[in-house]
Image (cartoon, grey):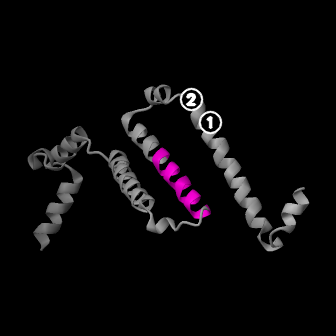
Amino acid sequence: MEDEAVEEYPTEIHEYLSAFEKSVDSVEEMLKKMMSVSRAELLQKIDPLEQAKLDLVSAYTLNSLFWVYLSSQGVNPKDHPVKEELERIRSYMNRVKEITDRKKAARLDKGAARRFIKHALSDPAADEGSPAKKDFKAKTKKI
C-alpha cells in the first residue's frame, strides 16, 4: 500500500515529504512532552520572566502551526490575521529579550567605584615621597 502512495506523486518530492513527516513527528513528540506536565506545576518552578518566555513560545508555536494548517488548506496565511498575531508575539519576544539583556548587562559596583575614585583623588601631599612623584617633579622642573 505504501508503494502505491509513493507512485502517486513525483519522486523528486519524496525527500521533502519525508523531511516534512519527520518534522511533524518531532513537533508531535515535543507537544506530548509539554502537555505531560501541568501548566500550574510548571509555572510554580520558574520565575516571572521565564513564565513570559514560556507563554510567548507557546503562543508563537500554536500560531505557527495554524499558519502551516492554513497553507496546507490552500489559504494564503499572509492575508490572514494570523500574520499580525505572529508579528505581535514577535514584538513581545523582542521586549522580553531586551529585558533579559538588561539583566545580563554589567552592573556598577558602587563600593568598588567609590574606592577607585577615592584612591585616584587621594591627597597628593601624602604621596610626596613616592619615587613616581619625584620623577614627575624632576621632569616637570626641566620643562
Three-letter amino acid code at disc 1?
Answer: Lys
- Is residue 114 highlighted in magenta? no
Residue 125 is left or right of residue 117, and the answer is left
Q: Residue at x 29, y 45 (%)?
A: 107
> How crowded is the residue under tag 1: few (<14 C-alpha within 10 Å), some, or many (20+)?
few
Query: Please, is residue 47 above or below residue 127 in the view?
Result: above
Q: SS for tag 1?
A: helix
- Between 138 and 68, the one lying in front of the other is 68
Magenta stretch: dominant SS? helix
- Read off the magenta span: 58-72
Three-letter amino acid code at disc 2?
Answer: Val
Please give the residue where the numbered disc 2 appears in the rendered image: 37
Residue 20 is left or right of residue 107, and the answer is right
Please give the residue where the numbered disc 1 appears in the rendered image: 33
Residue 32 is left or right of residue 12, and the answer is left
Q: Residue at x 13, y 46 (%)?
A: 122
- Is residue 67 highlighted in magenta? yes
- Between 17 and 116, the one lying in front of the other is 17
Q: SS for tag 2?
A: loop
User: Residue 114, how many percent across, how many down?
Assistant: 18, 42
Real-space Cα distance between discs 2 and 1?
Answer: 7 Å
Instruction: Confirm or deny contact between disc 2 and disc 1 (CB under 8 A).
Output: yes
